[in-house]
Amino acid sequence: MSLLSSDLVIDVTGVTKRFGRKTVVNDVALQVRRGEIYGFLGPNGSGKTTFIRMLCGLLTPDAGSGTCLGHDVLTQQAVIKREVGYMTQKFSFYEDLSIRENLDFIARIYAVPDRAAAVQRSLEQLGLANRSRQLAGELSGGWKQRLALAACLIHSPKLLLLDEPTAGVDPKARRDFWDQIHRLAADGLTVLITTHYMDEAERCHRLAYLAYGNLLTHGTVDEVVARAGLTTWEVTGDNLPVLAASLRGRPGVEQVVPFGNTLHVTGRDAARLEAAVAPWRAAGGHRWTRIPAGLEDVFISLMETAKDNFA
Amino acid sequence: MPRFSLHRFWAVVLKEFIQMMRDRVTFGIMVGIPLMQLLLFGFAINSDPKHLPTALRAADQGPFARSFVAALRQSDYFALVREPATDAEAQRLLQLGEVQFVVNIPEDFSRRLLRGERPTVLIEADASDPAATGPAVAAARTLAATVFDRDLRGPLARLRGQDGPVVFAVHAQYNPENITQYNIVPGLMGVVLTMTMVMITALAITRERERGTMENLLATPVRPIEVMLGKILPYIAVGYIQVTLILLAARFVFQVPMLGSVPLLYAVALLFIAANLAVGITFSTLAKNQLQAVQMAFFFFLPSILLSGFMFPFRGMPEWAQWLGSVLPNTHFLRIVRGILLKGNGPLEIAPEIWPLLLFLIVAMAIGVKRYRQTLD
Ligand SMILES: Nc1ncnc2c1ncn2[C@@H]1O[C@H](COP(=O)(O)OP(=O)(O)O)[C@@H](O)[C@H]1O
Ligand SMILES: [Mg+2]
């Protein structure tokens, strides 16, 4: 599948970043299309934040090349900064400024036309209009997140980079947040978002998985699951913890994970897995069902493999 | 690529101003510090400075004049560095601060001494820093009473007289009553400004980094120079509040004379305030956290108070300390303030102290802008 480069909002290859002798992002290539919601997943410390910082000109890559919004990521950082909205992992607006003052500051920095109206519109869209004089430091996590998103959007960026925007936010607020992201994407905004939540990963158009700085897989959810080629057995019945303990470590059994009242037993090699669990299936007492592997199973499997290869 | 942008600069100014006004405690301290120091330093610290530069106007070359000069030379207090040809030149040296004293030996000194007419030795002293002049003048007095004891023997011994063979006159200029507050209070201006200006800006960028707001700021198109100047401007206003407070206290509490032009002082203060703010900004690009920033500010503050001539007379310090002191903006500002207030100096007289300030400002600002990174690398 070849893409017109003008459709690619992010198009980078070979991106590498080292801190000291530690390679934090290793030869990563990424292509994100216009209007796409692109999920960026991976364990803590895998280099997601570092990668995003390189995209918006906050860090200089040690190697690699490419474009962001058509501008060279190595040389045109100043232009990129003007067209990108970046929401940092940690809340990074001024806690001693009010909501309105924060928005006003950002709007001034970007020279937003008709600033007062833009700030007012942003406050109303947020549902913060009647709390606009409250100090940002007094807001709860969910409201801080809303403020941060509003501030990132005030200069009408073409690309949103959201770094774990929903960490520590309640389910209702998360749902609202994702509804808004989808509305924005439908209007043509491109979004790159990092998350640890599987339900959020499934709401992305496409996603990529990063572990120890290496991009292990990417594509749609279905593609990623299919490519992993995992086989999963769901087990129900009594004494599941005992069963789990005896299954762990058997050849062919890669993950034994309790899900509520069930147990998921997963492996990459269907035949070896089947052979491994055969004695327990024959013994009876439990109900064994083949189910499609979930995204989480895929990610855990990828991470375990990556640990052996890179860590 | 766009260079300096006024609207981004102004955005930073407004933000800093709001943050400054909202931080009541810090703002209170900035206004409170000058008042507190005024109270604390109402009492001066004395010391015994030696080898003070002295100009000699000897109109007599007779034997007694020569032995008086030789004795002056041998005393630890006077360093005879100049022999001006005219009184006007001597006065000028005194006003510029190139010498601390002018020693005048009148015509016919030796002859009149022999005739028992008790000629007068006049010492004109720059007393704007009484701690520096006091001990030296006292030493000269003793000297004058005893220096001729060896020459006036036998029949001449009667010339020693009851009150000594010569009249010794001291003409203290610029601060005739030797009131230490006259010296301390103007000096405080530089000290207070150094302390608060450096500290407050040292915190300004470090705070952004520590609170994580720096990442956001760096992700926007705002440029380093816009951030720096934007952060500096609101504190210049604070600096002027401090200058005004000290001047008011100097005038109405300590009755310090104000011979020179106060507007001139305000104008020069801008240079000095900016120099200190630039130091603070530079520190804040070096410090990893706010505690380090405060420590750096103190590191700068101590020599500014000890080696600038505020605490101890500048000329009383060892040479290396004088050399170090000459680098510090406070040293020059101190001389400017004392010069304007106590000596009535004008732009011409303070010019030699202006360029070191200017140079310091440019260097500090350049380092600050260079050190302020636009990325997190
Ligand atoms: N400025 C830095 N200096 C040194 N190491 C860093 C720096 N920033 C990040 N790291 C290291 O790089 C690795 C990846 O970090 P990060 O990109 O924050 O991962 P993630 O966002 O995926 O959790 C971590 O091990 C982190 O400690
Ligand atoms: Mg991160």
Image: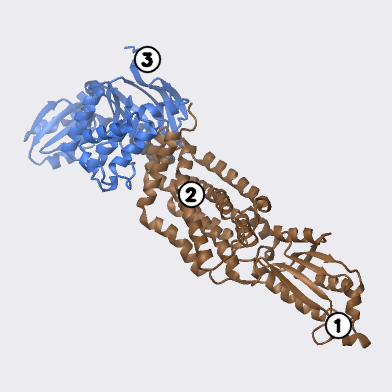
Decide: marks 3, 1 in contact (CB < 8 A)? no
Residue at disc 3, secondary structure? helix
Ligand 1 quadrant?
Answer: top left
Residue A90 visible in this rendered orientation of the protein: no
In the rendered image of this protein, which colour is used for chain B?
Answer: brown
Left or right: A36, with A257 as reference point: right
Residue A203 horizontal side relative to residue B207, left or right: left
- For label 2, the residue is B236
Give the CA separation, mark 1 to mark 2: 61 Å
Q: Is residue A243 at least partly visible in the picture? A: yes
Question: For the residue marked with disc 2, what is the amino acid?
Answer: Ile
Whole-percent x and y of residue B93? Answer: 75, 59
Where is residue B266? Give x, y as percent. Answer: 55, 52
Q: In the image, residue A263 lies at what x, y percent?
A: 14, 35
Q: Earlier in the sequence, mark 1 or mark 2?
A: 1
Does ligand 1 reach within 8 Å of label 1's beta carbon?
A: no
Q: Return the residue at label 1.
A: B149
